[in-house]
Image (cartoon, helix red, strand yellow):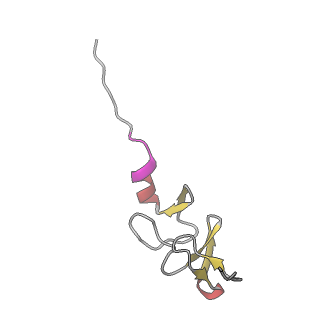
């Protein structure tokens, strides 16, 4: 039998998040020091400098490298 907790669960690790260690961003609770990091490079984030994709958080640099399409300049000669 699973015991209900009054604490939110961290989006990244699934463990309870207590108020002193919690940050709420992108619609979820996170452990501020250990889990509120870019999913790809693991760098620490703050709530003002992050990008969300499919309910995961990324730094801007990693988000661009993963999800923005590359544009190529194709020269067509006739």
The residue sitting at the top extreme is: 78
Q: In the shown orientation, is residue 8 left or right of residue 71?
A: right
Question: Where is 64 relative to 2, above or below?
Answer: above
* Front residue (pair 4, 38): 4
- From the top left corner, tell me how far across and down residue 56 is, in percent: 53, 61
> Residue 31: x, y in percent?
55, 79
Residue 39 in the image: above or below residue 53? below
Question: Does 67 lie within the magenta span?
Answer: yes
Report the quarter where the C terminus lies.
top left
* Image location of residue 55, percent across then percent down: 57, 59
Q: State the image coordinates of residue 24 (x, y, percent, origin top left).
A: 64, 73
**Residue situated furthest front in the rendering:** 1
Placement of the N terminus among the 4 image quadrants? bottom right
The quarter holding residue 4 reads bottom right
Q: Residue at x 41, y 58 (%)?
A: 62
**Horizontal side, residue 46 vs residue 78: left or right:** right
What span is colored magenta in the figure? 65-70
Find residue 63 and report its image quarter: bottom left
Image quarter of residue 38: bottom left
Number of marks: 0
Q: Nearest the camera: 19 or 45?
A: 19
Asked whether 29 or 6 is in front, the reply is: 6
> At 65% from the left edge and 85% from the top edge, which residue is drawn?
19
Determine the residue located farthest toward the left in the rendered image: 77
């Amino acid at each position: 039998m699973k015991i209900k907790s009054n604490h939110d669960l961290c989006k990244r690790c699934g463990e309870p998040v207590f108020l002193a260690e919690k940050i709420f961003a992108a619609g979820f609770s996170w452990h501020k020091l250990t889990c509120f990091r870019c999913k790809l490079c693991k760098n620490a984030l703050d709530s003002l400098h992050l990008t969300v994709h499919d309910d995961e958080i990324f730094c801007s640099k990693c988000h661009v490298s993963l999800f923005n399409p590359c544009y190529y300049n194709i020269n067509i000669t006739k």
